[in-house]
Image (cartoon, rainbow, N blue to C red):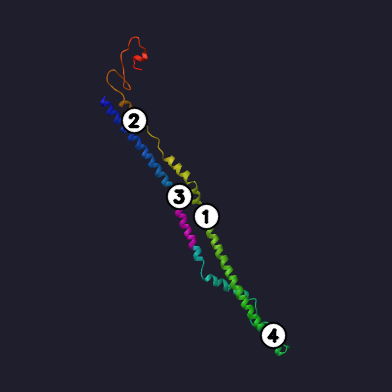
Amino acid sequence: MCLEMLIGAGLSAAGGSMARGEADRNATREVKARNRELGVLNNKADAATGANQTVLGDTIRAIDPAMLGRSQNTRVAAAESNLPGAMEDIPMSANAPQVAQAEYAKRMQEAIAKSKTTAGNLGRLAGFDQQQFDIGMGTNAAQQDIGFNNAPVQGQARIMPHLSDFRAIEAYRPSSGIGQMMQAMGSVMGGMPMGPGAMPGGMPMTAPTAGMPHAARIGF
């Protein structure tokens, strides 16, 4: 009887170890599958980050400090091109008195100088506006490119929990059942006396007693 109980205990222990081993291997496969899916997302995020850094670098390099000066010079030259360059460009009556001609020339020179100053100021302001417009266009383009680079990563991140669960289900392997079967057999052997006059489960068998119900005769 002790031998059978020892064999049963050994079967139960071995079966439990096998069942736990299968469960541990399933858990390991599940973790690895989830980590692989997370690694795919991380790789996409790294690629998007690299692309975004390139976009930002190009945008910053496009903002040349000399851009403002060039833009302002162009605008100032365009504004001043519509102004007379000197008094010779302005028709005047030759019959006017010298005093009137001199006064007229003086006032016209003052007007031309003031107009050039105003044209220069307006040109520089227009050049600044042009620079801000160009920078804004470049920034908007960069934002669009960054959004385009981030869209796949953001989309996959939203469904990441479902993808992770799906990969874990794919990695799952059903139990062989051998460990559970060995445990069951060990339990049966450990609780089954094997000597004469015994029933499975350790129930003693006695001879029928006359005048007693059958249930009473078998010990119920």
Residue at screen point 47% across, 60% down: 54
Residue at screen point 72% across, 89% down: 97
Say the numbered circle drawn on residue 41.
3
Badges 2 and 3: C-beta atoms under 8 Å apart?
no
Helix or strand or loop: what does disc 1 sit on?
A: helix
Q: CA distance from mark 1 to mark 2?
A: 58 Å
Q: How many marks?
A: 4
Q: Amino acid at mark 1?
A: Phe
Helix or strand or loop: what does disc 2 sit on?
A: helix
Circle 4 sits on which residue?
104
- Identify the main secondary structure in magenta: helix
Q: Residues within 10 Å of mark 3 (few under 14, many from 20)?
A: some
Q: Is residue 38 magenta?
A: no
Circle 2 sits on which residue?
183
Q: CA distance from mark 4 to mark 2?
A: 120 Å
143 or 210, which lies in front?
Answer: 210
Residue at screen point 28% across, 27% down: 5
Q: Amino acid at mark 4?
A: Tyr
Badges 4 and 1: C-beta atoms under 8 Å apart?
no
Circle 1 sits on which residue?
148
- Residue 182 percent coordinates (x, y): 33, 30
Looking at the image, residue 7 sits to the left or right of residue 130; the answer is left
Report the magenta residues as a range: 39-57
